[in-house]
Amino acid sequence: MSIILLVEQMLNGLQFGVMLFLMAAGLTLIFGVMGLINLAHGSLYMIGAFAAAATAAATGSFVLALMASLVAAAAAGALVELTVIRRLYDRDHLDQVLATFALILIFSEGTRWIFGSFPLFLEVPDYLSGSVTLPGGIEYPRYRLAIIMIGLAIAAGLFALIAKTRLGIQIRAGESDREMIGALGVNIARLYTLVFALGAALAGFAGALIGAIQSVQVGMGEPVLILAFVVIVIGGIGSIKGALVGAILVGLTDTLGGFLLPHLFATFMDASAAMSVGSALAAMSIYILMAGVLLVRPTGLFGGK
Amino acid sequence: MKFRTFATAIGIGVTALAAQAEDVKVGMITTLSGGGAGLGIDVRDGFMLAVKQAARDDIEVVIEDDQRKPDVAVQLADKMIQSEKVDVLTGIIWSNLAMAVIPASVAQGKFYLSPNAGPSLLAGKGCDPNYFNVAWQNDNLHEAAGAYANSADLTNSFILAPNYPAGQDALTGYKRLYEGELAGEIYTKLGQTDYASEIAQIRASGADSVYFFLPGGMGISFLKQYADSGLDIPVVGPAFSFDQGILQAVGEAALGVRNTSQWNKDLDNAANRAFVASFREEYDRLPSLYASQGFDTANLLMSAMDKADVSDTEAFRAALKEADFDSVRGDFEFGPNHHPVQDIYVREVIKEGDVYTNKIIGAALEDHADAYADQCSM
């Protein structure tokens, strides 16, 4: 095992974390501001990827495809908020879980109905394909590097939005006291729709970015959704900063765990046993991380109260 | 008392009627929704095409969706056996569902014809006279890949598969005939979609080839990321990751990749030419491996129906065993454990016009039987 390989794996972990952040940011905003558990967040990720694949197939432009993913996911998010989610704010979490789980099924089978059962094709554009050589002789795919930079830029933009703009003030106020900002004359219904659409757009954008290097297929969102929940629990529910730190922690733990643990076990076991024990333990590593964090800080790293 | 006699009489009458008609009722449990639906749909379409072409009125097919969930598949099998009273079951794609359904079904005296899954247990110790596999034993295509690696002078393979029974069977199958060294062996998470970490390890390992078994979306992700990584050592895989259904989603990243399969659309025999043409006509797409397996399954069943009555279990079983039908694979026969003995080919991914597809470049193994046949006693 060389230093170059280790650094490359850390970059992979960072890229995975940044992607998780895009999912988790929307999830944590929606939970923080509206108190809503949205299981259908993974479907919005899928919608983004399908919209991007369809647009790329029609126009051949990756930039247009990314824009289409933002628009389609935001529109789907706003539509769902107006028709279904709006009725759920006053219900308890179990009702929300039930209704948003139903949304997953509707979105999945609806997508299958429109696009068919076979995975769609979405390709990394030529100008981002191939790999670059980083200082130190590390060869790293250009597209993954771009994902890291885009993700960090979005994180910065989101922090600026929350900290500096009027919308950000309303979001923060909504997190601490919903009734009060309604009483102060903020159109709370519009704010909710806006936050939901913003969260949806981020998820859809993540879906499109990832769709280019993975497969665009029905059900692609659910595994990511589970990880996004782990991220927001670790980071503290409702906290954007927590989502960023949690996402990068989970990304690094998952990638480095899967890589290092088998090597670690191989120092005192035979290779194939070390491989199977190591990979089994690696699959658990992020949940062990979550349990550890909750043991020390029951509300998550940046959770309030 | 009188009433009961009357009811029994009706019961006997109905049974007698059913026996007279000699109809065969087939229960097809397959995956038609969710992420793995493409495979089930292909099996179903292949099967129904054969039934339609035979234009016979003594076969009835009940189709249900197992959603790729073992518990759902078990419920459907119970329903089909108890209330639908099917004679033959078929359709299951996934090995874990097959293990949940097949042993219980054949124990109740039903026939099961597998159009896809071939777990090793059902080929060896758990084999059953009423269970026939029309596709392959799970290890077969991987064994062929190992044999191909020897003939292509690949001596330092890096191998990877998901950490679940079929994944372990796959790597075991590859290693069974492969004679070279292993540069590395990785079990990934089932359902994993990001392979950056594995690709980095392949790069660092100094391997001369990569063998992977990553069915469905996992394989699409791996190939796209591999193509983008700048690595250029050859990749070999089983047909599952290079099938007609998913090749279009992989795109250029798959071009030129060698993969092993017991069937391809350019296999030169009359049955296959007719199958490919009629499938395209009927469904407006190219048939896949799975469609060919569904098609063969239906034709095997109907060949047995021509020779024996399904209620005569012994005779019907013997008729199935003869495998007297024109397989789209050319030669086809059953080994002693009711699994295929067949040729397995090496294919290469090519582009025909706008469509990515495969062409056969040679045979990997001839008249290949599975490694578990001698553990089967029946």
Image: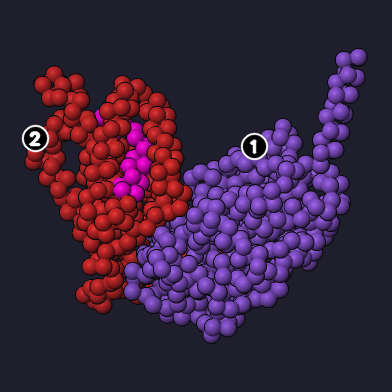
Which residue is located at x 60 percent, y 49 percent? B44
Whole-percent x, y for residue B254 in the image: 43, 69
Could you tell me which residue is drawn at 74 percent across and 52 percent down?
Answer: B302
What color is chain A drawn in?
Answer: red
Residue A104 position (above or below residue B213): above
> Could you tell me residue B220's position as x and y percent?
43, 61
The chain assigned the colour purple in the figure is: B
Q: What amino acid type should be assigned to the residue bearing mark 2? A: Arg
Q: Which residues are magenta?
A: A29-51
Task: Tell me the chief SS of the magenta region.
Answer: helix
Relative side of B54 to A34, left or right: right
| Discs 2 and 1 share one subunit | no
Q: Residue at x 13, y 31 (%)?
A: A170
Label 2 and label 1: CA atoms lie apart by 55 Å
- The residue closer to the viewer here, A239 or B156, is B156
The answer to whether A190 appears left or right of B89 in the picture is left
In the drawing, what numbered circle is on residue B10? Answer: none
Residue at numbered disc 1: B75
Secondary structure beneath label 1? helix
* Quadrant of res A75: top left
Which class describes the residues within 10 Å of circle 1: few (<14), some (14-19), or many (20+)? few
Q: Position of residue B237 (x, y in %)?
A: 52, 69
Question: Is B177 or B316 nearer to us in this picture?
Answer: B316
Disc nearest the viewer among 2 and 1: 1
Chain of the residue that carries numbered disc 1 in the rendered image: B
Question: Which residue was labeled with disc 2?
Answer: A166
**Residue B161 visible:** no
Residue A94 forms part of the magenta stretch = no
Which quadrant: the C terminus of chain A? top left
The quarter of the picture where residue A2 lies is bottom left
